[in-house]
Image (cartoon, rainbow, N blue to C red):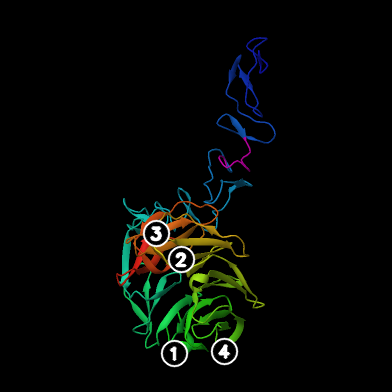
Amino acid sequence: MSAADHCGGCTTTCSAPPAVVPLCQNGACVPPTACTGGLTLCANDCVDVLTDPSNCGGCGHVCPSPGDGLATCSAGQCAACAAAYADCPGGCADLQHDDANCGTCAHACASGSVCVHASCTSDLLGVATVLAAATNDAWLALDDDTVFWSEPTSGDIRAVAKTGGPVTTVATGEAAPKQLATDGLDVFWSAYLGGAIKKVSTAGGAPTVVAAANQARFVTVDATYVYWISDVDNVLQRAQKSGGAAEWVADLPGLPGQVTGLASDAEDVFFSQAAGNTGCHLHRVHKATGAVTAIGLGYGISGAVALSATSVFGTCNAGVPGDNRIGAVPKTGGAVTWLPLQANLAEQGQLATDDCHLFASLFGQMPNTVEVLLAVPDHQPLEVLGPPLRSMVVDGAYVYGIGNGTAQLLRVAK
């Protein structure tokens, strides 16, 4: 008897997984050799080699993960690696951050090193790397490869690679340059005593005047305009980044010189404002209409301002030790969420954000701390990250800032 349902005896039936054709030879059940429904037999299982990522195009051909999800097989071909990943022999790899494939496939970082921006580095969490000498009152800005900073006393705008190296002076003789901003193509700054907003190409060249501006301290840019607020009036102004006449955007509340921070997104400009003991305020100015809206915070002395996708963060204190706060307000306005701070924290310095975290530099009563908070709504406890920094900026891997009292431009791994 050689029928699969009567193999060697009337009651002996050869079994097989679904879609596998059971096989009986010479009165004994033997491993199957065929499948039904157009499937292919691979290791005693019937699979669709057109769609099975473990047997894509043939038995045993395993598709690697594309890097940002599950491996897939279509028409017998493995799906290509996701846009940010490379097709390496061991699978799709993030060459920017994969310790086993750093910069190129199979380039493994040595023990004790990690892959950051496609380069192996031994920088450790909380360990500051000195990039250059810089004064405490410098202002910082970043592009993809370079840190720029202003030196208000000497009048220089300087630059150094994020990885370190020689310092380049991109502009000199500026009259007390203050806050910097960059759009990746140009670096913009306020020549505080020079009566102008100026710029220089990130690739180098001669600085040019964007617009006249009297004692402008704070600067921010978007795709079209550079915005600023000066210390001698209470007006938000802007000019085309390519240069031209200053344009009025909005009259601001309060008195001249009370603005303490400036930031922008695609639709609005946000600023923090100190009003003595009567207020510690955040405001939103709609770029298209100039409408000014108070959106939150409480009392005391306002400090820095930073943005996430949905929230505005600001610092606030009542002028007494220990009563220092960091608050978060929805961009559209609403209740303030005071982020968790233990008692007697030091003075808040600059704030900076990435996609996941709010970075807050705290200095004064608690030396040698930079602390990081998870942004709303996570409300996670503060985590010590490194030494105290001024004029802080961040990218995907590092926090950059001027070490408080060190006269150094520092880089701290996140």
The image quadrant of residue 153 is bottom left
Task: Determine the secondary structure under disc 1.
Answer: loop
Q: What is the CA distance from the residue labelled 2 to the residue labelled 3? A: 13 Å
Marks 4 and 3: in contact by CB < 8 Å?
A: no
- According to the picture, the residue beneath numbered tag 1 turns out to be 194
- According to the picture, the residue beneath numbered tag 4 turns out to be 244
111 or 356, nearer to the observer: 356
Q: Is residue 51 magenta?
A: yes
| Disc 2 versus disc 3: nearer the observer | 2
Where 24 sits versus 334, above or below? above
Q: What is the CA distance from the residue labelled 3 to the residue labelled 1? A: 38 Å
Q: Is residue 59 left or right of residue 343?
A: right
Q: Which mark is residue 318?
A: 2
Q: Earlier in the sequence, mark 2 or mark 1?
A: 1
Q: Residue 413's spot in the image, x, y percent?
A: 38, 59
Q: Does residue 229 show up? A: yes
Q: Which mark is residue 347?
A: none
Task: Determine the secondary structure under disc 2.
Answer: loop
Q: What is the CA distance from the residue labelled 3 to the residue labelled 4? A: 45 Å
Task: Determine the secondary structure under disc 3.
Answer: loop
Kind of residue indicated by mark 2: Ala
Q: Is residue 296 left or right of residue 200?
A: right
The image quadrant of residue 205 is bottom left
Q: Earlier in the sequence, mark 2 or mark 4?
A: 4
